[in-house]
Amino acid sequence: MTVKLLKYLPLVFAFTLVVNCKHEAKKTDSKNVATTIFYNGDIVTMEGDTANYVEAIAIKDGVISKVGTENEVMTFKGDATTLIDLEGKTMFPGFIDAHAHFFGFGPQASGANLLPPPDGGIQSIDDLISELSSWATPENIQLTGWIYGLGFDDSQLAEKRFPTKADLDKVSAEHPILILHISAHFCVMNSKALELVGITKDTPNPEGGIIRRMPNGKEPNGVLEEMAAIPYIAKAITPKTPENLAKQA
């Protein structure tokens, strides 16, 4: 009997070794279990000079631990892993543009498009006046009480200059008008808008801003720079609602 048991001892030892190895492998793998896995979307890694897409991405304690095919990444799934189905949406690792004017996307879509080609059609001040005039329907004006447009670029205009209040007065002398430069660091107002916000020949330049003047050196020409412009931009692009009207009262 003892001889027979000794005969099978190597098999028992080998089996025990395999079981222990598997157990150790599981213990080692548990250290890499993902906290969260994103899958089923267009996941852009931003690696290299061309777009690089992967099927899934694993996050471990706030750090990207694995990117690859869905099958590869799912090997890091554990019982406590949160699975997020992107449902075909696009995922980026973060906002790559360090200087994007996100606030302008909404107003740009609703105001007059004053961008130069190829994003718009404004190549001269006459083009700008025409575009603003076409946009200035009663329905559009009632949105904010202002006529407004965004994206003009003086360097791309045939005249190579900023429009002035005299140019914008051709669109309307009744309604306030504000147009925003493509840089968002300048705006131009018509005479009605300057009157509405209280900018006159006696208004000094605010700290950090410039009120451009007519050749006589005193009368505002409608072009406002930096902190002379920024406080008034929201007035032109903020929709009229009971709440906003109450704030302005």
Image (tube, rainbow, N blue to C red):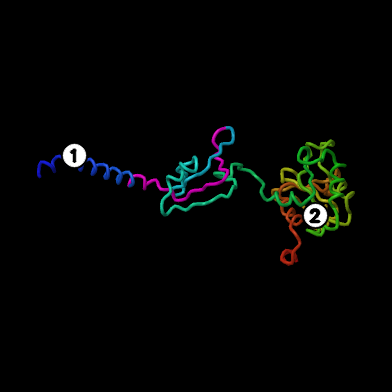
Segment colored magenta: 27-48
Instruction: Name the image quarter holding the N terminus.
Output: top left
User: What element does badge 1 sit on?
Assistant: helix
Using a 10 Å C-alpha cutoff, classify the residue at mark 2 as few (fewer than 14 neighbours), some (14 to 19) or many (20 or more): some
**50 on left or right of 189:** left
In this orientation, which residue lies closer to the viewer: 93 or 130?
93
In the image, taking residue 40 as reference, residue 16 lies left or right, namely left
Residue at numbered disc 2: 199
| Label 1 CA crowd tier, 10 Å (few <14, some 14–19, many 20+) | few
Q: Looking at the picture, how far across and down is residue 115, in whole percent?
A: 77, 42
Q: In this view, does 108 lie above or below 155?
A: below
Quadrant location, the C terminus = bottom right
Q: Nearer the viewer, residue 221 or 16?
A: 16
158 inside magenta stretch: no
Which dot, 1 or 2, sits closer to the camera?
1
Q: Which residue is drawn at 60% across and 47% down?
A: 89
Nearer the N terminus, badge 1 or badge 2? 1
Q: Residue 34 carries which label?
A: none
Would you say 232 lies left or right of 174 here?
left
* Residue type highlighted by circle 2: Ile
Asked where in the image residue 7 lies, by quadrant, the reply is top left
Residue at x-position 20% and y-position 43% = 12
Q: Which residue lies furthest to the top in this view?
A: 49
Q: Badges 1 and 2: C-beta atoms under 8 Å apart?
A: no
Residue 150 placement (x, y as % from top left): 76, 47
Mark number, residue 10: 1
Q: Position of residue 10 (x, y in %)?
A: 18, 39
Which residue shows up at 41% across the image and 53% down it?
79
> Is residue 42 a member of the stretch shown in magenta?
yes
Question: Residue drawn 76% across and 37% down?
Answer: 118
Residue extending furthest toward the left: 2
